[in-house]
Amino acid sequence: MASQNMVATVVAAAVSLLVGGIIGHLGTGTDTISSSDKEKISIMEKLVADKWESEEHLNHKIIDMINTDNLRNNLMELAKLPHLAGTERDHQLAHMIRDRFLEAGFDTADLVPYDVLLSRPNRTNPNLVTLEDVEGQIIFSSTYQEKPLHEDDSDPEFIHAFNAFTPAGDVRTEAGRGVVYVNYARVEDFDKLEELNVNVSGCIVIARYGKIFRGNKVLQAQERGAQGIILFSDPRDVALEGVEAQNVYPNTWWLPGSGMQRGTTYMGTGDSLTPGWPSTAQAYRLKVEDVQLPKIPCQPIGYDDARVILKKIGGTPAPSDDWKGGLTGVAYNLGPELQDRYSNYTLRLKTHNVLQIHRSYNVIGTIKGEVEPDRYVLLGNHRDAWGYGASDPSSGTAQMLETARVFGQLISSTGWRPRRTLVFCSWGAEEYGLIGSTEWVEENVNKLQERAVMYLNTDNCASGPAILIPSSPLLWEPVTRIMKMVPGVRDGATLYDEWMANNVAQNRTSPKMDTLGTSSDHAPFAFYCGIPCLNLMFKSIRNKYDITGYPFYHTGYDTFYMMDKHVDPGFRIQQGCGRIASLMLKYFADSLIIPYSLQHLPEAMKDALDTFKESGKRDKLMKICKKYVLLEESLANLTDTITVFVRKVKEKKTQNLDPVSIRAINDQMMKLEQVFILPAGLPGRPTVRHAVFAQSQFDNYAPARFPGISDLLYRIEELDAAERLEKEDEIRKHISDLTIMMERAASFLQDFHLI
Ligand SMILES: *[C@@H]1O[C@H](CO)[C@@H](O)[C@H](O)[C@H]1NC(C)=O
Ligand SMILES: *[C@@H]1O[C@H](CO)[C@@H](O)[C@H](O)[C@H]1NC(C)=O
Ligand SMILES: *[C@@H]1O[C@H](CO)[C@@H](O)[C@H](O)[C@H]1NC(C)=O
Ligand SMILES: *[C@@H]1O[C@H](CO)[C@@H](O)[C@H](O)[C@H]1NC(C)=O
Ligand SMILES: *[C@@H]1O[C@H](CO)[C@@H](O)[C@H](O)[C@H]1NC(C)=O
Ligand SMILES: [Zn+2]
């Protein structure tokens, strides 16, 4: 196994011979350098050149070239019409993006089709929430379309309100009872209800959006025995300055009363019919009945409609202010009884969603690398939207098209070409559970694990001005460096200054980078493959508005007008997004030694183990498994190994390195995170394979560290003795697996002959 070092030595020898030979030639003064030698020198120079370091002027050029007018025009075109996954318009845009990649001068740009299970409401038979009296007269019926409030948000093709993958169903309550308000429908909310003796079994529950992934809400409601769930956006989360017309869209960015959040409820990722495998034409597909989809009907409504229902709920009063939203005249009673005067009313939820296989395209464009074409630096963004999708995802697409143009122009005007291959990806059907990216990763998993240097995701680049870049710790330092190069999008000199200011405003003394949650197309790259990823976005300023997400998320008001007028007037945010993205791509494509910050990996893991100490988890674990100390020890060992490795790489950077050694060092770093991929996945989750960083099982959006440990410990006290013993055994195995992974990682970074 010393072969790589031997090859390195041989190449180094060959290089010195070659150069020596040439110098020899020169030394005699009689010969000129032969053209074949010249060629060899030029090849050699390319192999060892650090184009990032030597071509700094190009970085300034890139910063100047990302153009706000282009971004605006791109967004106007992309968000002109609704472009739901698998629709005609979605397909048109796929072609448009392919053509734009080709116009920019890409080496390839192709549509990659998959046939995948999607879910839609019935256009002629809309989903309804109704209140009916004892005779079956309809007293109230919910709306299923946003009220058109501006000229560009009234397209008849706009998809009616629904939640994807919830079944068609028709459920109703008894007269006068059977409706429970469940706050955010989190586990702790249902626990509280149980404590208060409010039984949701057989009821239709109504929950506000926010805090956790909607799929977890539906699943919890189902597990607690509810027969249906209604979701609404509460003004406290989406209309913080009042619900009057002057305080909401189109006059502000806040959500009006008819805004309804659509979204998927499927708990997995990718096409549910082909878990772990690509949905190609010949692929084996599960039967729809065998897929774990929600079993109870669900429907989103706006807060104007929610008010009508909530006002009628009596029964147990809200236990605390935490349960009260911002609807005036509503007490936020829990139910299950309606108030006396509505004792003849029944609440009915009737949905007509349809499951069907549709074609969805990814668009994959490449700029071939000059020196290492088999190393990929990837940029991805989804294309499909619930509606106009101006922010989500078209602000990211507008950016990607501009970034593509800039790289194309760099090639044609300066002759530049990246050292490594750039791959641009426009994903389909992300909104249905990261389908396009997941299927593509499943199809290309070997190539990607072997060749991908990093994946940069931009979904909705702009939903506010504050930059947020959760990422693999391997990218923390490089992205910080790039943030320092890019001018601010508000009043800060650089994006780094603005990021710091935002950290300070949030009382974070030492600014911390965040690790990744699932929430977008980086998930299959990060959590299935172990590829270092980064999810670039600009969001609202947290200390200004205490809200999760942004008010018009997944509604009919995510329009070009919203972006142009309220969110990103002047398009400076999307420009900042394009600048960061293009410089990160160039940094990773052109640096001789890939600029990973390895030292942050054990640091982030140590942080996680420290929080286990603080939260009492460590004590629990020690009672179950004494060998937990070995996990801590192996992490300490890995930390030492990485410190030594990083120092060596720094030293080597200043020396003249031969191409094989460069490649070998880069590969060690590039594949380090893959050591933490569990072949069989996390306990009970075969497609979530990252043992250190992955989303938590109980909130699909939230990032977690060592998620297997938290998942296995979850509610362990409530298990009966036999189940508990079984779980404890699983914990001992998982801790052992983690310890071995730490040791493998340290071993992976050792000198090659130490096997
Ligand atoms: C939609 O509803 C109509 C009217 O009930 C029905 O005829 C039609 O078959 C439904 N479409 C689908 C795709 O189920
Ligand atoms: C809740 O209601 C269901 C159905 O009415 C019943 O089977 C169950 O025992 C009740 N749970 C509690 C804790 O009362
Ligand atoms: C409910 O219906 C019954 C029978 O139709 C009627 O006698 C009663 O007055 C109604 N109650 C209310 C509160 O409307
Ligand atoms: C930061 O700390 C100050 C003073 O303790 C407090 O008033 C403020 O609410 C905190 N801000 C945030 C965003 O937590
Ligand atoms: C940590 O490193 C020491 C010294 O090499 C070694 O003896 C020990 O077994 C390692 N611990 C673990 C848990 O790998
Ligand atoms: Zn999105």
Image (cartoon, rainbow, N blue to C red):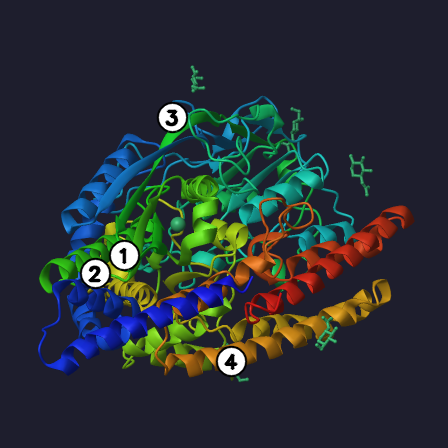
Q: Is residue 180 left or right of residue 301?
A: right
Q: Which residue is mark 3?
A: 123
Front label number (4 vs 3): 4
Cα separation between marks 1 and 3: 47 Å
In the displayed structure, would residue 229 be above or below residue 450? above
Is there CB contact under 8 Å for labels 2 and 1? yes
Q: Which residue is mark 1?
A: 369
* Earlier-in-chain disc, 2 versus 3: 3
Q: Secondary structure at mark 2?
A: loop
Cα separation between marks 4 and 1: 40 Å
Residue 652 drawn at (x, y percent)? 42, 80
Question: Which residue is painted at 33% across and 66% down in the image?
Answer: 584
Is residue 324 at least partly visible in the picture? no
In the displayed structure, would residue 589 be above or below residue 181? below
Q: Quadrant of the C terminus?
A: bottom right
Q: Residues within 10 Å of mark 4 (few under 14, many from 20)?
A: few
Foreground pick, 215 / 749: 749
Cα separation between marks 2 and 4: 40 Å
Q: Which residue is mark 4?
A: 508
Q: Is mark 3 within 8 Å of ligand 1?
A: yes
Question: Which residue is painted at 62% across and 29% down in the image?
Answer: 172
> Which label is found at residue 174?
none
Foreground pick, 271 / 681: 681
Q: Which residue is mark 2?
A: 417
* Earlier-in-chain disc, 4 versus 3: 3
Is residue 696 at least partly visible in the picture? yes
In the orientation shown, which residue stands out farthest toward the right? 721
Front label number (2 vs 3): 2
Front label number (1 vs 3): 1
Front label number (4 vs 1): 1
Question: Which residue is painted at 16% across and 62% down in the image?
Answer: 36
